[in-house]
Image: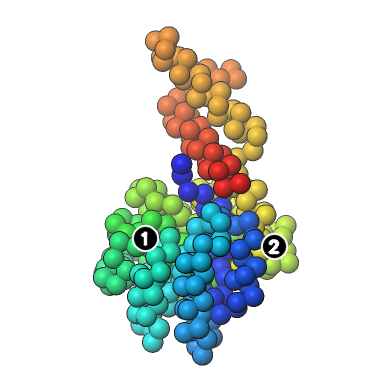
Amino acid sequence: MSTVLRSVLYMPSSNERALEKAKSIPCDAIIFDLEDAVAPDAKEQARANAVAAVTSGEYGGKVLTIRANGLDTPWGAEDLAAAATARPDAVVVPKVSGAAHLAQVAAVTGDLPIWAMVETPAALFAIREIAGFPQVSVLVMGTNDLVKELRAAMVPGRAPLLPHLAVALAGAREAGKAIVDGVFNDVKDLDSFRAECEQGQQLGFDGKTLIHPAQVEGANEVWAPSADEVEHAQRVVAAFAEAEAAGRGVVVVDGRMVENLHRDIAKRVLATAEAIAARG
């Protein structure tokens, strides 16, 4: 069964009330944030809160991760050491610059999976070595920082970012890794948020990072196969099985010839639907 990452919610680990509420939010994954969302004087308490959360066993089947501060900060090394002890599903590493950076992280975290954030030009130029690093299991787009670093405009449709999103996607897929889209900042504009989710899904992302619980439902819906898609996928897989059993080389579904690639896509749709059903 594959892991679903339709909705990946950032939670400020300094906010204990938010951490409690997150237990009942139907997101697929949580990033317990120690970095941007936490003030300097709250960093140590946030770290303790994040460790308590991931070891509590009270978040159901959600994927639980901790975003550490950078190693160039006073808190980064201790964040990584705490994650190595707490054993979340992954440690999220901000502003990854390349394999050497990831090796420094892995020297502390060992075999703990890493979610590498792609949010700088350096990451884009090093995308193949980042995606191919053994401990990296997921790439996370940090689109806000990327916009800042590129001096790009943040506009509806994200045209200035599309080439860079495509580069990161290509790196992830070449390495066989998952990749989730960046955040949408206007938590009140759910229509535009959904449009950006649909764009991300069409581009090929596995899900989206979120900054507010109100965004979870939309992301879950966009990245879930529809009943029609599941039914079509079942017929494609069945038609291929029937053709193979009969020794036929040509497979036709709904009047259209389909190939091995269509069968592979159909199997991925069914695996996603099964994983979502298992999550409840």
Residue denoted by label 2: 214
Q: Residue 249: image x %, image y %?
A: 41, 14
Question: Looking at the image, which is closer to me, 280 or 125?
Answer: 280
Asked if residue 176 shows in the view, the reply is: yes
- SS under mark 1: loop
Residue drawn at 30 percent across, 61 percent down: 111
Residue at mark 2 to residue at mark 1: CA–CA distance: 28 Å
Does residue 17 lie above or below 162 as drawn? Answer: below
Which of the two labelled residues, at mark 2 and mark 1, occupies the earlier sequence position? 1
Q: Does residue 252 appear left or right of residue 93 in this picture?
A: right
Q: Left or right: where does residue 55 sit relative to residue 256? A: left
Disc 1 target residue: 113
Percent position of residue 20, x then y: 62, 70
Q: Given the image, on which type of amino acid does mark 2 rest? A: Ala
Q: Amino acid at mark 1?
A: Pro
Residue at 49%, 72% (x, y): give it.
52
Looking at the image, the residue that sits furthest to the top is 246
Q: Residues within 10 Å of mark 2 (few under 14, many from 20)?
A: few
Tag 2, which secondary structure? helix
Q: Residue at x 72, y 57 (%)?
A: 191
Identify the residue at image location x=69%, y=62%: 214
